[in-house]
Amino acid sequence: RYTEQGETKRMPSKIMTAATFRHELSRACDPQLHTHCVVLNFTQRPDKQWRAIDNEPLYRQKMLIGVLYRAELAREVQRLGYEVRRTRDDGIFELANFSDRQLEEFSSRSKIIEEALAAKGLTREAATAQEKKIITIATRPKKSDVDRRALQEYWEEKALRAGLNVKIPPEQSKIAPQGGHAQALRYAIDHATERQAVVTEDKIVRAALEFGVGQSTYDEIKQELRRAVAAGHLIQREDRFTTPQAQEWERDILSSEKRGKGAVSPIMAFGDVFLKLKEVGLNQGQREAAALILTTQNRVVGVQGLAGTGKTFMLQSARSLAEEGGYKVQGLAPSAAAARELEKTGIKSQTLAAFENSKNKDLNDKTLLVMDEAGMVPSRQMQAVLRIVEKAGARVVLVGDTQQLKAVEAGKPFAQLQANGMTTAGMGEIQRQTNAQLRAAVELAARGDVFQSLALMEKEITEVKNPQERYERIAGDYTS
């Protein structure tokens, strides 16, 4: 990291100065091999100038670094002749061929933490990460000097009591890591792209190492990744990757929207729409959205509306006028709850999954589909719906907010369609909040001005640190 003409800039560096300290003990004096790594805050540029390190990428990749360490450790353990077994999805492993009771004999620290959690009515599974962190720190004993010879004798006594044989049996001494690099990478690609269409190299590598702990190293997975790109199984975009399937979905979605421009007739003439909407009492954003739905000549249009801008009232008006014009209006939503909410507009609705699986979709050129919560619809489903709509000669309006929850599956088609020129009406006037100050705060937050939004609400925020007192205060304020 360096500053030039008052601007802080960053550049990559492959030079790092660090000291590693290998420790063999836990704070409870159980055997626990681990390494502390101290990185000095400087690096050298190509021009031989020394500059400070930018720590953010290092912090962002801390989980990957942990996986790399465990992958190498598991590989070395196997070379010594021991088997390993993965105990968690994140690549945590144990030595195989030892019973749980034997492992617990040398897990005093874990027992202390679990007992402290139990005293608070918690378990490792039920406690949050923050709760576990607090308990871990609170029960952490101070480090002390240890008589290693006495400790070794104590360990041997415990091992004997637990029936633990630390010698490697002859049948295990020839164990060597099996190279399942391709399988690990295939899993990683499927796992990483299941919910994101475009992923970083770090995410793929981490998933592969977690899956194949002890079977693959960082360099082996990187090599397999290069092979996958060369074979066309992955498509690289600078420092990110996508799959041919995701690219095909994206291409089909954008092409379908473009083919639909000028492909349908307006439901109503603009003049008629203007007069009828004037009688309803919509605000400007609501009128523009309803007018777009009713007067467009495009098969696919969008309504981008912030939460609380009155989309429900707008859709009620648009649905009523579309039905007057002889159109059947059907609703689609990504979840059952969203479909029920959409039905409050008078539009008969179903989930996208139910729509996809229904044999008789009953669509024609007099059908208007309304897809609500479009920002939560993944590429796979968006492509399927647009294909069905185009084949039937129907039309669809995509209603949602690109800033709200994203799709569970991969892709952001609603945002991509807007970015690539889909005709879209915007609804930005908040209707839900009646308090002027709260409405202003919500509008600021919606625009991304989070700090200004919080500053506006600061006087309205009451902080009660004790959880029990906080719950009582909330209940009291709510019922008063």
Image (cartoon, grey):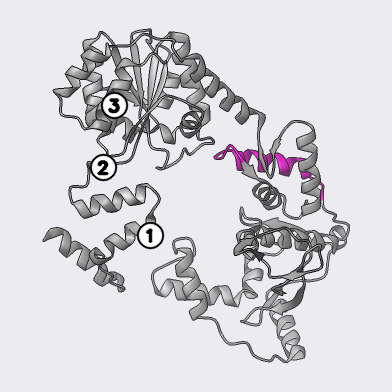
Q: Is residue 467 visible?
A: yes
| Residue that label 3 marks | 288
Q: Nearer the viewer, residue 25 or 420?
A: 420
Type of amino acid under label 1? Phe
Q: Is residue 319 above or below residue 78?
A: above
| Residue that label 2 marks | 430
Residues marked 1 and 2 touching at CB (< 8 Å) = no
Q: How many marks?
A: 3
Q: Is residue 72 above or below residue 31?
A: above
Q: Magenta stretch: residue 187 in it?
A: yes
Residues marked 2 and 3 touching at CB (< 8 Å) = no
Left or right of 462? Residue 214 is right
Residues under labels 1 and 2: Cα distance? 19 Å
Element type where label 1 sits in the image:
helix
Type of amino acid under label 2? Ile
Residues under labels 2 and 3: Cα distance? 15 Å
Residues under labels 1 and 3: Cα distance? 31 Å
Instruction: Name the dominant secondary structure of the magenta segment.
Output: helix
Left or right of 445? Residue 282 is left
Graded by Cα atoms within 10 Å as few (under 14), some (14 to 19) or many (20 or more), the crowding at tag 1 reads: few
Residue range highlighted in magenta: 178-198
Q: Nearer the viewer, residue 440 or 79?
A: 440
Q: Position of residue 177 (x, y in %)?
A: 82, 53
Q: Which mark is residue 333?
A: none
Q: Is residue 441 above or below residue 382?
A: below
